[in-house]
Image: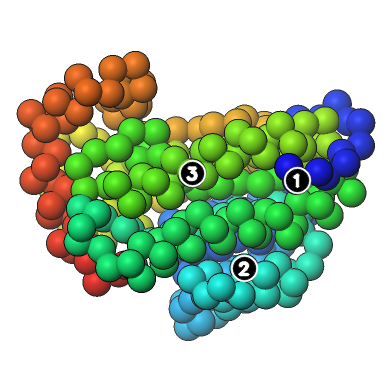
Amino acid sequence: MLRLAPRACSSVGRVQVGGTTVLLTGASGGIGQAVARTLRARGARVLLSGRRAGALEQLRAELGGGAEVLEADLGDAAGAAGLAARAGAVDVLVANAGLPASGPLVSFTPGEIDRALDVNLRAPIQLTRALVPGMVERGRGHVVLVSSLAGKVASVGSAVYSATKFGLRGFAAGLREDVHGSGVGVTVVFPSFIRDAGMYAQTEVELPRWVGTRTPDDVARAVVRGIETGKAEIDVAPLSLRLGAVASAVAPRSAARLQRRLGSVAIAEAIAREQRAKR
């Protein structure tokens, strides 16, 4: 068990974003950029992390003096530790970086499975392990883990991806108990299909009209809401998909049959084809 020796504190980890230092991973992607802009607009100093240095520098220039670039590859075994060391003391960690990892299990190489686990699950855990003790010592901080609605309900072609995203939810639940009473909060954000930017949007796969989508700005607002309210879990999804997640938790086999009847197989296959090169 990770013993953090939290001090007595009545806070549940609510932190006002203004004036904080935030480490944001996955900042070079479209959703990460939306989160960075929202955090900066609220007065946070944002440490922008990602693999694409050019995109990060462009975003830093846009955000002005309150942003700094910390390039890192979280698929590298030393990436998370090195990033945490360079970031130093931060008030908030937003673990947003992720790989698609779509497709049937047998279509993955062992290396592709390891990379998905490294980026989507191992790196957020390692970053949290490195940064949370300082938050506890200061009696103030927050961790936001950007999961996916696939971290609540799995579908065809999501075995690897859902494993990583379910893992984040379980990690957060245990961590929340570890830091209870310390002034450090833990929020998991569960986006569904996000239009305009991000992994799904880049596939350009058309969804049935009833499915619905949300925007990168919706995710950004959810991140800020989690930090400032201390809410444990926040869905960023239309009502139909949120209800589907509830149904899957109550009756998983029946929910899976309904998904198949509604065309989930064709959608999943199309998305996996478009994301294959990004594993």
Label 3: which secondary element = helix
Label 1: which secondary element = loop
Q: Earlier in the sequence, mark 2 or mark 3?
A: 2
Q: Mark 3–mark 1 contact, CB under 8 Å? A: no
Q: Earlier in the sequence, mark 2 or mark 1?
A: 1
Residue 188: quarter of image: top right
- The residue singled out by tag 1 in the image is 2
- The quadrant the C terminus occupies is bottom left
Residue 225: quarter of image: top right
Front position in the image: 31 or 77: 77
Considering every residue shown, the one lying at the far top of the view is 250
> Is 193 situated left or right of 30 in this image?
left
Q: Position of residue 268 (x, y in %)?
A: 17, 48
- The residue singled out by tag 3 in the image is 167
Above or below — where is 34 with respect to 178?
below
- The quadrant the N terminus occupies is top right
